[in-house]
Image: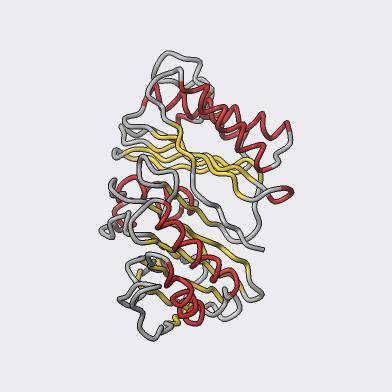
Amino acid sequence: MVYDTGQWQLAALDDTTQVGAARRLAARAAEFAGLTDVMAGRLGLVVVELATNLLKHATRGRLLLRADGQGEDAAVDVVAIDHGPGMDLGRCFDDGYSTSGTPGTGLGAVRRAATLFDAHSDARGSVLFARIGDTPGPRRGSIALALAGELDSGDGWQFIPTAQGWSAALSDGLGHGPGAAAATEVVLRTHGEHPEAPARCLQLAHERARATRGAACSIVVHDHEANALTHAGIGNVAASVIGLDDSRGFAGQSGTLGATCPAVREQRIDVSARSLVVLHSDGLSARWRLSDYPGLRTRHPQVIAGVLFRDAQRPRDDATVLVIET
């Protein structure tokens, strides 16, 4: 089964009238995912509380939603991202605590309503993550947004469970808009057919993408039994592994799928349990280090993805980051 999240939906929050718009966006996500009425109600509560909190307390707040899957294994993820001033999370989840004279039940209510909740906050800002519903497989998180003003993103990613573990691919079509999206669609369709053979997949995607403007792509395959990762990459999609005590980047190869592609090489490394695999397009700067964020390494991958997106995003391109725990 292929888990293809598509793009996140961004709720603009310039004034209080847009809280209702955010809730309507949540209702559409709940309908798409097939959530029960009870779960849809919980989602609505989470979205209203997080949107209201951003408007009251945050600087440059953004609320993002994504429906992941459909049916029994479906979920809707909500991520609130801001640029400060940060908060005392321990106190904010105590009912009755407020910095603005309100009843102070918002974030406590969010945590109770969510199937899964996690957060990180410091002086640079906060990222709050709530999931309604549940999805199988290892813990993972993403943020993916098209360039402002574009409906189609040239970035895309897939997560595919395999007999031995999982396979993940992140593709970045050249440029942005429909042409870039068409190139990424070809690459990800090929990945869906050959998820466990990264080099073969990219070589075949290169041939299939000749009629498109081309793309960059990184693929990482996890073998759970062997505690190993296999990577292949063409172009500037970054791939790295962050262990409990060290971090290392995978070496991609220069080229463009569909245009100029060398013979694709695979790299295999051993990996410890609970390592993090991070893939991102060049819509994010590569100048980030998790060690710059005390405590972030232990948070849910969705929170980590939100923090990296907030602080490393380049505003003039599609931007996607994917974080998976081994």
- Residue at (40, 23) in percent of width and height: 55
Specify whether residue 304 is in view: no
Q: How is the image coloured?
A: secondary structure
Residue nearest the observer in this picture, 318 or 104:
318
For the image, the number of numbered tags is 0
Q: Is residue 198 visible?
A: yes
Residue farthest toward the left in the current orientation of the protein:
287
Give the percent coordinates (x, y) of residue 217.
Answer: 41, 68
Q: Position of residue 321 (x, y in %)?
A: 41, 55
Left or right of 82 on screen, residue 71? right
Residue at the image position 30 percent from the left and 76 percent from the top: 254
Residue 236 in percent (x, y) is at 32, 67
Q: Where 191 sits versus 3, above or below?
A: below
Q: For the N terminus, which image quadrant?
A: bottom right
**Which percent across, then down, holds residue 173?**
39, 61
Identity of the residue furthest to the front in this view: 211
The one nearer the camera, 265 or 221, is 265
Q: Nearer the viewer, residue 153 or 195?
A: 153
Q: Splitting the image into 4 quarters, where does residue 77 fall? A: top right
Which residue in the rendered view is the most extreme toward the top? 101
* Residue at x 54%, y 30% (from the top left corner): 47
Residue 136: name its quadrant.
bottom right
